Image (cartoon, rainbow, N blue to C red):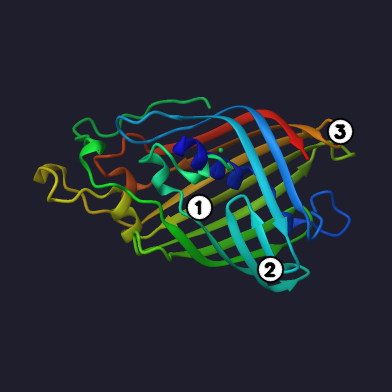
Amino acid sequence: MYKQIIGCLIFLACSSVAAAECVEDSESCVTVGQWHLSVAAGYGELSNPLYGEEDIELYLLPSISYYGEKFYFDDGTLGYSFIELPDLTVSGIVNINNQSVFFRRWHPTNILQGNIMSSFSGDVGKLSADISKLPKRNIAVDGGIQLNYYFNNNWAFQSRLMHDISGVYKGFNAQLKVDKKIAVTDDKRWQIFLSLGGDWLSRKLVNYYYGLPSKRLELSQVYVGESSFNPFVSVMQSYKINEQWRVAMSMKYQYLNDGVTQSPLVRDNYTTIAFAGLVYDF
């Protein structure tokens, strides 16, 4: 269930449309000072790229958000906007790092977020390591700064720089992302949301989660992690049935670069997450 929790948060992060991206009189705006709750029921999977680990199945995905004048909470992310202009927002944010989801049976992000799965065997001579014999990978909490720039109502850019404030891996991570919204029908009942971007993981982050210490393993299996930039693409479709119900489908593909995939722990050079179901907005 831990993994279901973290998978939910990852799914929501890659498939939801940020309320900050709205413009006045747009349907994507949220009411300031009110809590917003929705629940999606359906089926999805988060692929696990590690040896000996199973993919994470997703069935029920709650979404919780609150936007005040400056403070907001959006599916596991706490934020405070200290610069707000018509086309630019700069915020300080805190959230849970999602890298530990692949190593733990329980994780907070599988409850607040999300394929056709294919297998990539990696190097034939690559040694796989038994995760059960390795030191525990703990959950980390990141804090940092996020910038959102809105070109217009349909295009947006987001960047963030985060640091481990919990002292778990003591490193950094960053993200760059461009979002595009497409109204398929004139009444905007059917919309498509596209995202293209990448996640940068520092050497300390990669080494903590994917490195292999010499004290626990044979010399041939020791791995010291390197920084990695992992590009991704995601697409979400939403069809509004009425004021409460809508149909939603989402998929994200992320390529894992050498800094991660050279670890003997890692089997696949990608991760995917997908979900399809009905959403009820309270």
Label 3 Cα crowd, 10 Å radius (few <14 / some 14-19 / many 20+): few
Left or right relative to 251: residue 38: right
SS class, disc 3: loop
Q: Which residue is mark 1?
A: 198
The three-letter amino acid code for the residue at tag 1 is Gly
The x and y percentages for residue 67 are 73, 59
Q: Give the mark, 2 or 3, whose residue is nearer the N terminus.
A: 2
The three-letter amino acid code for the residue at tag 3 is Asn
The x and y percentages for residue 236 are 66, 38
Where is 84 relative to 79, above or below? below
- Give the label on residue 89, or none: 2
User: Residue at image x 36%, y 30%?
Assistant: 120
Left or right relative to 199: residue 76: right
- Give the label on residue 190, or none: none
Where is 88 relative to 138, above or below? below
Q: Which residue is mark 3?
A: 242
Q: Give the mark, 1 or 2, whose residue is nearer the N terminus.
A: 2
Where is residue 51, by image quadrant?
A: top left
105, 184: nearer the viewer: 105
Which quadrant is the C terminus positioned in? top right
